[in-house]
Structures are given as structure tokens and as C-alpha cells.
Amino acid sequence: MKAIAFVDYENIWTGLLERGYELRPEQLEGYLQYYAARNKVDILAIYLYANFDREEFWRTQTTFQKTNVFTRHVFGKNNYASTELRHNAADLELMLEAQEILLTRTSTFDSFLLLTGDGDFLSFVRKVRAWGKEVKVIGVTGSVHHALQPYSEGEDILQWLLQEKPETEYCAEQDLEKGIHILGNLQIRLPYVASTRARAALTELLGRSVSQVKEFIRYSIKENILIEREHPDSNLKIGKTKIYLLNLENTKVCEALGVLREEVSQRQLKLILEI
């Protein structure tokens, strides 16, 4: 059987996160390979839809593209003002592209694999089936709308993840010295270190996942290594942002920064005077 997969990525990612699992691109690819082998399905293409401006999906689009997944960036809202600009934007883009494929490449495939739990897709599923094509819904247990359950056949990404080897427990302390250096250099180079910028830099330079970096930040704040503050910024619609400052009174910070401490101290003083 030949199939084309469509992934409502934010729906699947959120459903798993609510159950304590942060889905990584390679895991999604691994699941689809597992599904294809178990069900003897030839997946011709994978189309994935998400708002890749979200901090949680930083660099995710590039990772997917390297594995030959066709990504579709669909912006959904202004994160600063929290105003909805395009309600259900990813859903609409997915359905439009799927219907185009249905109409123009009808003979090239037998079924659609729809990775979502969103009940808004019910009408779409019925339309595809009316054209004589199968639709198999794959979702996360507890997050699949009851209207889609008759088409899900019990497929569950969460159950597959539970069978996978769990990620080794992360210890933030092992990255402390390097993390302090990264944040110190950011404070020297930038007017201020916004929380999103700090997490992006730590993710890249520490080589850690988003969840691990969040744990690193939580640990640093708890141990009084980082200070979290609100900083005014007239360039933002809400007029302020969250920033991080290294606590230069902390012994571990001083030891890790070494000669950089004085530069960081001067930059912090300048920042305070500018407020």
C-alpha cells in the first residue's frame, strides 16, 4: 500500500508534552519508519505543518528537512502581543495541500496517514474517503477527538515512545561552567540577554535539547546563579521582556567567569544605568 503522511506537528507535540514527553524530530521519523514496516506501507512523502517561529521548535525545521520531510512554516500568532492572527492556520494549510494532492495525483497513492488528534479534520477525512481513498488517523492517547477515533485503529505515538529507551536523566551541574561562560559572553556582546536568546544560545552551544536547557535555567535560578528580571523595551508591542543576569556575587559564577567577571560587571552596571 502506498501512502502519503500529513503531520499536524503542533497538535502531536503538544499532546505528548502534556503527558511529559517532548517529541524530537528523529523520534517522529523513527515512529513513521516503524509504522511503515509493521503495516507494510510505502510512505511516498511526509508533509509537516507547524509554526516554526515558536521557541520550542527552534532549528526543528532544518532537522526535518535534512531527513527529506517536506516542512510547511505556518505562522499562527504574534507571540509578543498574544493576538491570534490566523486561527487554525496549520490545519487549513494541511487540508488545502492534501486536497490538491487528492485531485491532481489521485492514482499515485492508496491512503493518507493523518497525524493529529484535532476533531476539526473530521469533514476532511470524510471527503477523502468519499473519493475512495483510505485515511488512517494516528494520534496520542487521550488527545484524539472522539469523532476521529473510528479512523485511528488504535495507533498511538505515546505507546511507541514508552517502548523506546528513555533519555538519560540530565544533570544541569555538569554544564554549569560552560553555561556560565556562554551567558557571560552574551552579556558582554548584547544590550541585554533576553530569555529566548539565552535559551537558543545554550541549546546550540551546549548541544542540549530544549527541555534540558529549560532544566539548566531552572537549576541556575534556584541556585542563585541566574537572576531573572523584566526589562523595558519600547521596540516590543508589550513594552517589556524577560532577561537573565548572572549573579556576580555567586562564588560559582565568579570562578567560572574568571577574567571575564569585570567585563560582565561593567556591562551590568551600564544596563542598570540605562533603565
Image: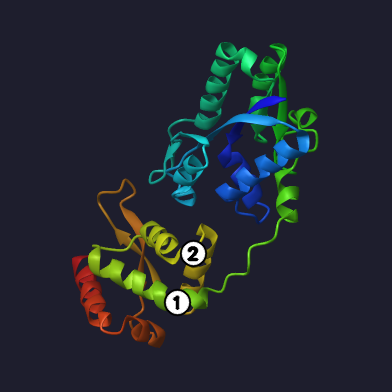
Query: Based on the displayed image, in which of its 4 quarters is residue 227 positioned?
Result: bottom left
Relative to 168, 69 lies left or right:
left
> Residue 55, which numbered label?
none
Residue 199 percent across, percent down from the top left: 42, 61
Q: Which residue is mark 2?
A: 213
Within 10 Å of disc 2 (Cα), the crowding (few <14, some 14-19, many 20+) is: many
One can see residue 249 in this view: no
Relative to 264, residue 196 above or below:
above
Marks counted in the figure total 2
For the N terminus, the image quarter is top right
Query: Based on the displayed image, in which of its 4 quarters is residue 11 positioned?
Result: top right
The secondary element bearing badge 1 is classed as: helix
Point 62% across, 42% down: residue: 12
Give whichever of 209, 238 is nearer the camera. Answer: 209
Mark 2 and mark 1: Cα distance apart in space: 11 Å
Within 10 Å of disc 1 (Cα), the crowding (few <14, some 14-19, many 20+) is: some
For the C terminus, the image quarter is bottom left
Residue 42 percent across, percent down from the top left: 67, 30
First-in-chain label (2 vs 1): 1
One can see residue 4 in this view: yes
The colour scheme is rainbow
Residue 248 percent across, percent down from the top left: 33, 81
Give whichever of 66, 240 is nearer the camera. Answer: 66
Query: Based on the displayed image, in which of its 4 quarters is residue 231 positioned?
Result: bottom left
Amino acid type at circle 2 is: Val
Point 66% across, 26% down: residue: 3
Residue 147 percent across, percent down from the top left: 75, 28
Q: Which residue is mark 1?
A: 176
The secondary element bearing badge 2 is classed as: helix
Relative to 196, 161 lies left or right:
right
Amino acid type at circle 1 is: Leu
